[in-house]
Amino acid sequence: MHAANRVALNTSVLYLRMLITTGITLYTTRIVLNVLGSTDYGLFNLVAGIVLMLSFLNTTMASSTQRFLSFAQGTGDLAMQKRVFSNSLLLHLGIAVVLVLGLEVAGLFLFKGTLNIPANRLVATQFVYQFMAVTVFFNVVVVPFNGVLIAHENMVWVAVVNVIETLLKLAIALVLSIVAYDKLMVYGGLMAMVSVVSFLLYASYCLRKYDSCSLTGTRANRDRTLLKELASFAGWNLFGTLSGLGRSQGMAVLLNIFLGAVVNAAYGIANQVATQLNFFSATLLRALNPQIMKSEGANDRDRMLRLAMMASKFGYFLLAIVAIPACFEMKTILQLWLKNVPPYTLIFCQLILVATLFNQLTIGLQSAAQAIGTIKYYQIVVGSMLLLNLPIAYVLLRLQYPVYSVIVSYASVELIAGVLRLYFVKRLGGLSIRLYLSRVIGRELLPTAISVLTGFLLVTYVHHPYRFLISVPLTGLLFLFSIYFFGLCSDEKVLVNSFFKRAKSKLKARSEAVHA
C-alpha cells in the first residue's frame, strides 16, 4: 500500500476509535465520580493517576522497538527483526520489574504521613496503589508488542483493543453502583484487570500474525550489543517520559499536601479532559510516526523533517479546533457532563488545555529527535525542564499564591520546553528554525486569533443556556476555513485538494456502480 494511503487509512481508523472511546470515556468518568464521590475519586487520581497517563509511557517506549524494527524492515532483514523483538522483550521485562520495585519502595514513604489521606481511607488507598503496580507491570511488558504493531502500521488491531478497553471500563463503572464492598478497592482491582486483558489481546495477536514476533527463540536471539543499544535508547526515552509523568503526578502530590484530595479530583478531571481532546492530535501523530522513522532509516532526512513539521502543524490544528471553543464553553460543558463539579475544575481545565496547545506546537519534533536517535542530551535537558515545574509549584503554594498559578507555571514551562526542542532538532538534524517558524508557527497564528476572537465575541454578546450548540460548531467551522486560506502552505493545499478530488471521484464511481 502506498505510504500516503496507508497514513490516510490508519488516521481514519484511529479517528473512528477516538470518536467511540472519547464519548464512552467521558460518560464513564461521570458515573465513577458520582459513585465514588469527590474524595475517593481524588484519592484514586492521586495514587493511580500515573496509570491514567501510561498511554503516553507506552507509546513513547514503544518507539524504541518500532524505530529499530522499521530500520530492519527497510533492509528486509527478518532475522534482525526477530532479534530486535526478542531483545526488546527481555529489556522491557527488566524495566517492568525495576519500576514495580521502585513503586514498592516509594510506597513505604508515601503512606507514612507524606500524603494527605483521611485515616479511614488509608487501607483502601494502599490497595489501589498495589493494583497500580500490577497495571504498570503489564503496561510496560506489552510495549514490544505495541512496537511491532506500529512498525507494521497496523492501527486496526490497536483501535480494536482500545475500544474493548473502553467498554470494559464502562462495565466497571456500572458494576461499581451495585457492589456492596469498598467501591474504591473494587475500582482499583478491576482497572488493573483491564491491563491484563489488554496485554493478552496484544500479545496473542502479534505472536500469531507476525514472523518477527516469537517467544521460542528469545534466548537464542539474545544479542548483547543490540540489547545495549536498545537499553540506551529506551532508557533515555524512559527518562524523558517519566519526567513528564513525574511532573504531572508530582503536581498532584503537591496539590494534595497543600490543599487535600478534593483538589486532586479537579486536577484529575482537567487532565482527563486534556487527554481526551488531545486524541485528535495524538491519532495523527501515531499514524505519521512510522513514516517519520522509516524516512530517517532510508536516509531521507529532508522528508523526515517535512513530516515532523507537518505533524506539529496539523497536530496543533486538530487539538485547537476543539480546545479553543471548549475553553470558552468549559463551564457549561462541565455542568452538563458532571452532576457535581469539584472546586477549581473550571480554571484547571482551561489552563491545562492551553498548556497542551503549547506542547502541540513542537509535538512533531519529539518524533524527529526519536528518529535521529541521538537523544541522550535532548532527554536530559527537556526532561529536566519539565521537572522544574515541581520546585516552582512548591514555592508558589508555599507562598500561598492562588492555586491556579501552579497550572500557569505548568503552561509556561511547556512553552520553554518547546523552544528547547527546536534548538536540539536544529543541532542534531539540521532543522531550519526560520523554515519552522514560517511553515508551522507563523501559519498557526492567524487561524488561532480568528478562533479566539470568535469565541470571545460569542461568549460576550450571546447569552443562552445552550449557546455552546452554536458557538462550538461555528468557531470550529471558521477555524477550518482560516486553516485552509491562511494555515496551509501552497504545497499542502495541493495535497489537500488532490485528496478531496480522489475522494470525490471514488464516491462518484461507487455511486455509478450502485446504479448500474
Image (cartoon, grey):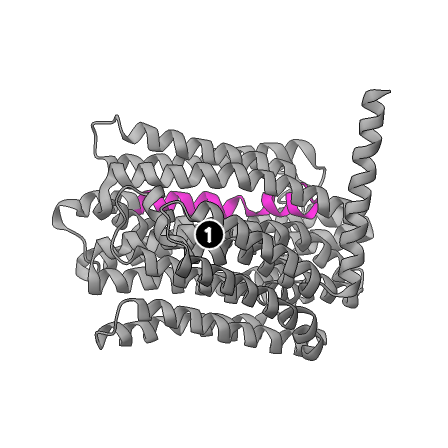
Q: Position of residue 387 (x, y in %)?
A: 41, 70
Q: Which residue is mark 1?
A: 275
181 or 462: nearer the viewer: 462
Whether residue 462 is situated above or below residue 432 in the rendered picture = above
Q: Quadrant of the C terminus?
A: top right
Q: Is residue 130 magenta?
A: yes
Left or right side of 9 for 505: right
Q: Position of residue 126 (x, y in %)?
A: 24, 47
The answer to whether one can see residue 20 in this image is yes
Left or right side of 290 for 178: left
The range drawn in magenta is 129-154
Task: Look at label 1 and name its amino acid.
Answer: Thr
Q: Position of residue 27 (x, y in %)?
A: 39, 37
Left or right side of 194 for 366: right
User: The residue tagged with tag 1: helix, strand or loop?
Assistant: helix
Q: Is residue 481 magenta?
A: no
Whether residue 97 is situated above or below residue 212 in the rendered picture = below
Residue at left 43%, top 40%? 25
The answer to whether one can see residue 1 in this image is no
Residue at left 72%, top 37%? 211
Q: Residue furthest right?
A: 516
Residue at left 64%, top 63%? 313
Q: Residue furthest left?
A: 119
